[in-house]
């Protein structure tokens, strides 16, 4: 149960960070948090494919943020 809460918190932080990095995406706070949670899964999957380990809290935040930025980029391109 605690690991799920930590996973959601990291995803929420990653979504917020990705929203700040991707200026002009204007998805709003709630959508950025949702994207961050999905981005954490995407980032973990992509990093796993290329063999990069995201150990620890900082590694998880970085991986999740990169996944969320990528997801926001793709969504932004599809939106236009």
Image (tube, grey):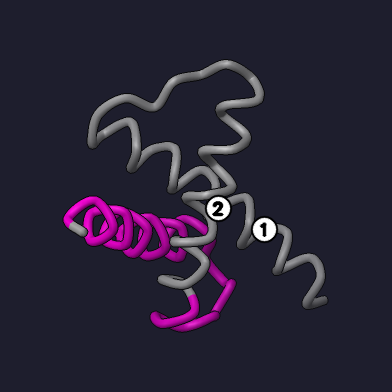
Q: Residue furthest top?
A: 51
Q: Quadrant of the N terminus?
A: bottom left
| Residue name at image x 17 percent, y 55 percent | 2
Secondary structure mostly seen in magenta is helix
Q: Quadrant of the C terminus?
A: bottom right
Give the answer, above or below, for where 10 lies relative to 61: below
Q: Secondary structure at mark 2?
A: helix
- 27 or 60: nearer the eye? 60
| Residue name at image x 23 percent, y 36 percent | 57
Where residue 62 sits: x, y (%)? 38, 38
**Bounds of the magenta span?**
2-31
Horizontal relation, residue 12 to residue 19: left or right: left
Pointer 1 and pointer 2: residues touching (CB < 8 Å)? yes
Where residue 15 sits: x, y (%)? 42, 62
Q: Residue furthest front?
A: 1
| Residue pointed to by mark 2 | 69
């Amino acid at each position: 149960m605690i690991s799920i809460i930590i996973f959601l918190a990291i995803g929420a932080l990653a979504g917020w960070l990705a929203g700040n990095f991707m200026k002009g995406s204007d998805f709003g706070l709630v959508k950025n948090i949702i994207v961050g949670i999905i981005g954490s899964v995407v980032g973990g999957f992509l990093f796993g494919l290329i063999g990069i380990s995201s150990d620890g809290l900082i590694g998880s935040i970085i991986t999740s943020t990169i996944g969320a930025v990528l997801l926001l980029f793709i969504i932004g391109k599809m939106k236009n």
